[in-house]
Image (spheres, helix red, strand yellow):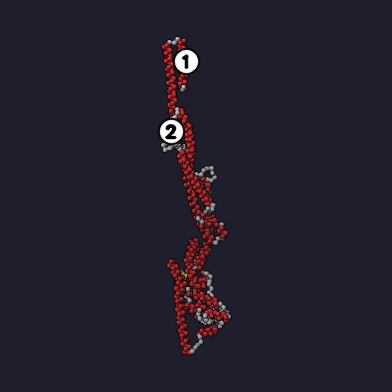
Amino acid sequence: MPAAVEKQQVVDTTCSSLLRELQHIWDEVGESDAERDKMLLQLEQECLEVYRRKVDQANHTRARLHQTLADSEAELTRLFSALGDHAFVSRAETRAGTLKDQLAAIAPQLEQLHKKKEERTRQLMEVKSQIQKVSGEISGSSHNGDAEFLSPSGEPDLSLRRLEDYQAQLQSLLKEKSDRLHKVLECVNAVHTLCAVLGLDFFKTVTEVHPSLDESGSTQAKSISNDTLNRLSHTIQSLQQEKKQRLLKLQGLGSSLLDLWNLMDTPFEEQQLFEHVTWSIGAVDAEVVTPGALAYDVIEEAEVEVERLERLKASKMKELVLKKRTELEEICRSSHMEPDPSTAQDKTNALIDSGMVDASELLASIEEQISKAKEEALSRKEILDKIDKWMVACEEESWLEDYNKDENRYNASKGAHINLKRAERARVTVTKLPALVESLSSKTRAWEDERCTPFLFDGVRLLAMLEEYDFLRQEKEEEKRRARDQKRLQEQLMTEQETLFGSRPSPNKIINGKRNQNGLRTNGNHTPTNRRLSLGAAMLQSATSDLLTPRINGVTPSRLAAQLGKDSKKERSRPSAPANYVALPKEDAVSLSSACGSDPTSPQGV
């Protein structure tokens, strides 16, 4: 039997017993039937009112349960949508059972989703807070507003996808922060290095950019905003520009010091005191990293020293001008050039004493002349080398001529074999003379065409010297040809005379006899130099030498080479046959004559 039926029976039994007790009371009291009916009707109305009130209360309770169930289902749907959870419980499952059963089935899911929502919200809030913090550090502004997580439809978006998006955004911001922090530290290190080189206060410089960049304030996070990076870059550029300006200034001071030291022959010990200044002359901006290398104190110290040397230079200007003029003359002398006469010593001293010309300008003018002289000397070097070879060849030619005139050159005497070897070398050198002169002339013409100025050798144009040499050489060759023709003619006449009048003494023997009568030894121990002791031989030698040897400004090339050799290089000795011969043993004389292919006393030329 159902419980409701049993309860109804209990109620019915209770109501019946109460009605019987009421009727018994009415019987004892003696109530009328009308009164009894009235009271029974009243009882029925009151019972209906109680039932109706209870039914209304039950309806209200059922309605509240339906609304609660609907709200729970809506909340469940909203939470699933917000969390992005696709494991949605179907409505058919929630409709199974009574309303309370349905509410009891939804309640655990709601509680679980609420907890999940709170955890997801907390995670999103933390990530969002970190994003805002890092974004604020990057942008340089502080933003502490509450984070709202809304979907495009305006509903809260607490999905795992949104959390992953925020986490990815946070990682990207953290990476950018790390890169910016690394860049800031690099800039701070660069500022530190530049301040150390320039001798500036690093902490003052870097705190002017941002207080957080001071290394002593390690508790405060370093600013990594765009503004801080821009200000750091501007500071570095400013310091680098200052570094370049100071380096250029220090290099100028170092060059001035070197010039002044060279001018006044400053001792090396004094120069070492400013070695930290002169090192910068050839330095590149990136190479200067020594702390304090470009400090104001170093530059001021160098400026004071330059001013001191300038004052000392002014007091010794005349000596400096003389020294530079001597240097110019030495360069010109070594290159056989004529120095500018406008800066001669007597003229410069007069100009300095009269005050008509500033000594510094005069010194600068001489230095400019030295620079041009060095440049021209470098361009003349190749030609001067060929001139030296030409002079040496002329010396050899002159010696060979003297040697060929020596009738006793084949005598078996001490040193004769040395002269023979030298004669062979001299012949080779003389054969190269025309080609050497031609090459020297072509190079000289090219030099003159390039510079549009004549090539002067000790004030005389070289091409004129070479042309004169060629002319004299041609005359000498012509004279030799005439001498050969005259000799043949004489020999022909002597042959005819011998045919008509018989043999006569050889002219060579007559000449040798005369020479022996002049006091020379008969053992053949004499040289071209000894022959010049004879008056007739001296006159003959002088005439022949004047006629056949080229002259340059009235001086033969051989003598000119001897004079110039003292200036340009070591003087070359002109070997000749020894002054005193020592008679060789007979065997040596025989071997020498056989080697030469003629009698040692033969006058045949080599």
Residue at position x 47%, y 72% in the image: 436
The residue labelled by disc 2 is 90
- The crowd level at tag 2 (other Cα within 10 Å; few <14, some 14-19, many 20+) is few
- The crowd level at tag 1 (other Cα within 10 Å; few <14, some 14-19, many 20+) is few
Total numbered circles: 2
| Residue 598, visible in the rendered structure | yes
The front one of 541 and 443 is 443
Q: Which mark is residue 278?
A: none
Q: Are marks 2 and 1 in contact (CB under 8 Å)?
A: no
The front one of 543 and 357 is 543
- Residue 560 x, y percent position in the rendering: 50, 73
| Residue 142, visible in the rendered structure | no
Q: Is residue 606 above or below residue 202?
A: below
* Residue type at the position of mark 1: Ser
The residue labelled by disc 1 is 17
Q: Is residue 463 above or below residue 112?
A: below
- Residue 455 x, y percent position in the rendering: 45, 69
Tag 2's secondary structure?
loop
- Residue 445 x, y percent position in the rendering: 44, 69
Tag 1's secondary structure?
helix
* Residue type at the position of mark 2: Ser
Q: Which badge, 2 or 1, comes first in the chain's sequence? A: 1
The front one of 603 and 120 is 120
Furthest-bottom residue in this view: 501
- Residue 148 x, y percent position in the rendering: 45, 37
Q: Is residue 463 above or below residue 145?
A: below
Residue at position x 46%, y 10% in the image: 28
Q: CA distance from mark 2 to mark 1?
A: 53 Å
